[in-house]
Image (cartoon, helix red, strand yellow):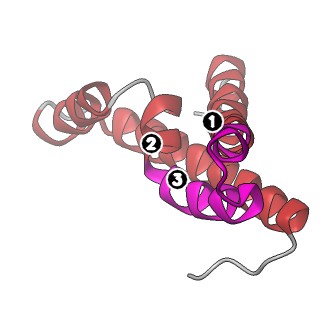
């Protein structure tokens, strides 16, 4: 079930979500600096609010995931459900890792 192709997809999903959080927070911090807002505070806020978008970007949009789950439920291909679940979990882990890295850079604890 855990083929080489699925493993490669999971690794890519992790790092795409990680990159969305890191890149979005850092570039947003630069933008905050340019308009006179505190960059570290804005980076802190962006890291928390970008999580869902990082997951959506990593799995390639929500409609593909919903279609895979539907196919698994109604057409009996349960492997699609597990693969999609693993992809969402890998993206969630990447988004959380990116958020924790931003938290470490900023030096503030993120509110859960």
Q: Marks 2 and 3: CB-CB under 8 Å?
A: yes
Q: Secondary structure at mark 2?
A: helix
Quadrant position of residue 111? bottom right
The segment highlighted magenta reads: 28-52
Q: Position of residue 102 (x, y in %)?
A: 79, 57
Q: Secondary structure at mark 3?
A: helix
Residue 71 belongs to magenta span: no
Q: Is residue 16 above or below residue 96?
A: above
Residue at the location (72% across, 45% down)?
33
Report which residue position mark 3 lands on: 51
Residue 38 belongs to magenta span: yes
Report the Cα–Cα distance between label 2 and label 3: 5 Å
The mark that comes first in sequence, 2 or 1, is 1
Q: Position of residue 68 (x, y in %)?
A: 28, 30
Query: Which quarter of the rendered picture does the C terminus lie within?
Result: bottom right
Magenta: main secondary structure: helix
Report which residue position mark 2 lands on: 53
Report the Cα–Cα distance between label 2 and label 1: 8 Å
Residue at the location (65% across, 38% down)?
31
Quadrant position of residue 35? top right
Report which residue position mark 1 lands on: 20
Q: Secondary structure at mark 1?
A: helix
Q: Is residue 65 above or below residue 46?
A: above
Left or right, 78 with reference to 103:
left
Q: Marks 2 and 1: CB-CB under 8 Å?
A: yes
How many other residues sit within 10 Å of disc 2, few (<14), some (14-19) or many (≥20)? some
């Amino acid at each position: 079930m855990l083929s080489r192709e699925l493993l490669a997809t999971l690794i890519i999903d992790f790092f795409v979500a990680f990159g969305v959080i890191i890149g979005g927070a850092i570039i947003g911090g630069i933008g905050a600096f340019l308009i006179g807002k505190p960059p570290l505070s804005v980076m802190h806020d962006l890291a928390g609010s970008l999580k869902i978008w990082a997951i959506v970007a990593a799995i390639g949009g929500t409609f593909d995931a919903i279609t895979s789950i539907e196919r698994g439920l109604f057409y009996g291909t349960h492997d699609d459900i597990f693969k999609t679940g693993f992809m969402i979990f890998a993206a969630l882990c990447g988004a959380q890792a990116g958020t924790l890295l931003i938290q470490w850079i900023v030096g503030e604890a993120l509110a859960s």
